[in-house]
Image (cartoon, coloured by chain):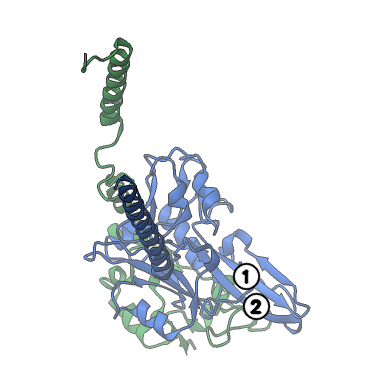
Amino acid sequence: MKFYIPPQITRLALAFAIFISLFLVLRHFLVPKTFGVYGHYRAASLIDNAQLEIHYSGQQACFVCHQDIEDKKAQDVHSDIHCETCHGPGEKHVVNSKVEKILKPTGREFCGSCHALNAAKLKSAIFQIDLKKHNIGKNCIECHNPHQPWEMKK
Amino acid sequence: MGNEKVVSSRRKFLKTAVTLAGATIGYSWLKSSQVLLHAAEPKDESLPWYGIVIDIQKCIGCGNCAKACKNENDVPKEPFFFRTWIEQYTVKNDGSVDIVSPNGGIDGFEQRAPAEDIFKSFFVPKMCNHCSKSPCTQVCPVGATYESPEGVVLIDEKYCIGCRYCVQACPYGCRFIHPVKKVANKCTLCYHRLKKGLAPACMEVCPTGARMYGNLRDKNSEIVKFLKEHTTQVLRPHLNTGSKLYYNALSSEVR
């Protein structure tokens, strides 16, 4: 009599056992393999994120071919500006330089995106020009070499 | 005899209960203040733990960062989707503050008022703060957004169900739902570039070096040196998000 378990409890226990094992089986198939390796997320997602393609190659890749520009740039105030700041994403050009050409912005407005006068820019941060007064109608690169801005063209 | 036994066991019980309660309260107090002081630095010390510095005094609002981010990460070109953007603040002499960000700053900025009316004006680049106690990762119901062991907050695009909880949880407005993929999208600190030894696209193209990233764990790194030598502040410090994006020369007008 001591170990008598009422039938309703047995049935309930059986139902619980079925539900729990069903849950465990489903969980085994539904939870991704790498989930929870580092935390509450799929560890394989780190690899997914790391494997995305790059578009900007970094200026060291540019200098492999364009050594002359590196030397020119190093002598003047644009030395710290990386190539792709003005020339745009260059990875395609690095991979296939014959077909994919790099951007060569020439307009006055383009130089102005950095150098136009604006009270929000600190004077010490950047050399500023009033585009409405400075040599109107002329392109900046007619006088300034963009890689060496203070070596004026004649 | 029986009474004495009851009294002594009651005394014993009370003693144990008081000790346990005291220890629990004391421990939780200690632990909570530790959490406030130090953001949750991940344990794996072989990996870097990334932080970001943005120097407002150096930013000239050229928009190259926002443009490069869109190119690098295939962010939709419409002006509603940004992983990073720039805001122009203009504080006028009458005390009013004007904040604009036309197309995230990609097309550049115009001065908003004549110079004599301006008290001060500056640019504030914004991006994901890569918080170490990030509200966005905590609300995700499926574990599709998380902080990587390097301290970069990432999204698992295959697992995200697009419920938008994280979009509304981010106090800095740094997330959006990708209009084509229909899943959450945000700055990854160019995780794919970091892993290849390259700088994030926005920092690669910044002409003035206003943005900087580095290993907060390495006490000799450039970023730690900068943090030591400058008065920096995070956005919304009262929210205790453990933000790892530090602004130099941040004005109180910035929201």
- Residue A18 is situated, as x and y percent measured from the top left of the image, at 28, 18
Left or right side of A47 for B52: right
At mark 2, the secondary structure is: strand
Q: Quadrant of residue B236?
A: bottom right
Q: Nearer the viewer, residue B182 or A114?
A: B182
- Of the image marks 1 and 2, the number of the one nearer the N terminus: 1
Left or right side of A23 for B109: right
Q: Are marks 1 and 2 in contact (CB under 8 Å)?
A: yes
Q: Quadrant of residue B38?
A: bottom left
Three-letter residue code for mark 2: Ser
Taking the image as drawn, is residue B77 in sight?
A: no
Q: Nearer the viewer, residue A21 or B162?
A: A21
Subunit of mark 2?
A: B
Pointer 2 residue: B121
Q: Which mark is residue B233?
A: none
Subunit of mark 1?
A: B
Rendered position, B168 above or below B246? above
- Chain in green (letter): A
Rendered position, B102 above or below B75? below
- Residue B66 is situated, as x and y percent measured from the top left of the image, at 50, 62
At mark 1, the secondary structure is: strand
Pointer 1 residue: B88
Q: Colour of chain B?
A: blue
Determine if marks 1 and 2 fall on one subunit: yes
Three-letter residue code for mark 1: Gln
Residue drawn at x 36%, y 78% is B224
- The quadrant in which the C terminus of chain B is found is bottom right
